[in-house]
Amino acid sequence: MTLQAVKMRSRGFICVNAHPEGCRRNVEQQIEAIASSRPAGLAGPKNVLVIGASTGYGLASRIAAAWGFGARTLGIFFERVPDGDRTATAGYYNSVGFHERARTNSLFAASLNCDAFADSAKRDAIAILKREMAPVDLVIYSLASPRRTHPETGQTHESVLRPIGKEYRSKTIELDSERVVEVSIHPASKKEIADTVAVMGGDDWRRWIRALLDEGLLAQGARTLAYSYIGPEMTWPIYRDGTIGMAKKDLEATAAALDAELRNRVGGRAWISVNKAVVTQASVAIPVVPLYKSLLFKIMKAKGLHEGALEQMRRLFFEHLADGQSAKTDEGNRIRLDDREMRPDVQQGIATLWPRVATENLHAMGDFAGYKRDFRNLFGFEVEGVDYNAAVETDVHW
């Protein structure tokens, strides 16, 4: 046993360790939220593969499938395991908590801790699906990674957050000092654009779906979704029109190609789900976005519209993916779960505040305190009901 009191360690704003009990409590709360709001008699997909299943939207998707529909789930993720006094990553502890509760509730769950981009991951997943779960009726692609080694070329690509064509200037929160500062970001090179698309575009999603099709592991009518974000025009230079945006556009093109292929081969569908801005481990790295989210959360909470990843996935699974429901899409064949964020009154509120927000009024105008708390919650810290002075077992496994 490795009992220790785990105190939050940070490097600036970023947590560099995780609390196993806090992570478990987070998972429990999400499970209870799904189980308690599930409409009577609701049914849906029964064999679900989630690629990128340990945090954020991927974890919430897996919880919604399991406790919303009683689905058997296979989760794919790449997380650091505990090592002596060194804690595991939050995603690892989330997955342990998921498995513990699944066993308690007699739900089948399998997980692979591996590089999802690798061909070996697909082979291992296929073996589990054939043995335990086939045929799969829903595949969720929610992978977020800063780099990818291509399985054919062996080349490692790294994604970057940069504008395209010209320098980008705006304001953001300097997370270490909590000051509102001006930011200037140089445009990406052609190689950086291509590398970002190689990591975050649709190529790996396509490889997963075709591997499953070729093995006959997708059920008739099987569906697949990948998650994306569009956001307001004020963020487009660094997001929608930047390197990440190019990757997202490639993801959308992949969705269209997969939709046609799935319709033809198994009568299935492929969609992009455009989700609301939420706090994620990756989002703090995007300039402008933490400041935008601080203002957004304040406004949406005041209007009773705010949602986290779990609430978004509850809407997706119960209103779009459940039996008897049909996915409601826009003209681009995208499911728009960002509809509340993009309401004109919400965006007008942000546009009014944006020119005025500064270091001195940040906490009054925005909900940066809530943003920080949500971020630390991701690592199992500042979770209500957890005694952070108590020793906990850190070397846990599913």
Image (cartoon, rainbow, N blue to C red):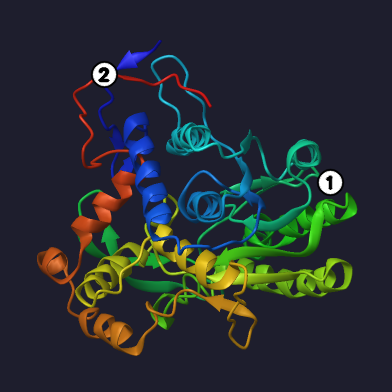
Q: Is residue 187 visible?
A: no
Which structural element holds mark 1? Answer: loop
Disc 2 crowd rating (10 Å Cα; few below 14, some 14-19, many 20+) is: few
Query: Which percent across, then down, holds residue 294?
Result: 26, 66
The residue to which callout 2 is attached is 391
Query: Which percent across, then down, holds residue 203?
Result: 74, 59
Query: Which percent across, then down, holds residue 328?
Result: 58, 81
The type of residue carrying mark 2 is Ala
Q: Is 357 on the left-hand or right-hand side of 398?
A: left
- Tell me what residue is drawn at x 56 percent, y 76 percent: 335
User: Which is closer to the viewer, label 2 or label 1?
Assistant: 2
Disc 1 crowd rating (10 Å Cα; few below 14, some 14-19, many 20+) is: few
The type of residue carrying mark 1 is Glu
Q: Residue furthest top?
A: 1
Spatial separation of the CA atoms under disc 2 and disc 1:
46 Å
**Which quadrant: the N terminus?**
top left
Q: Is 286 on the left-hand or right-hand side of 146?
A: left
- Residue sitting nearer the eye, 130 or 224: 130
The residue to which callout 1 is attached is 152
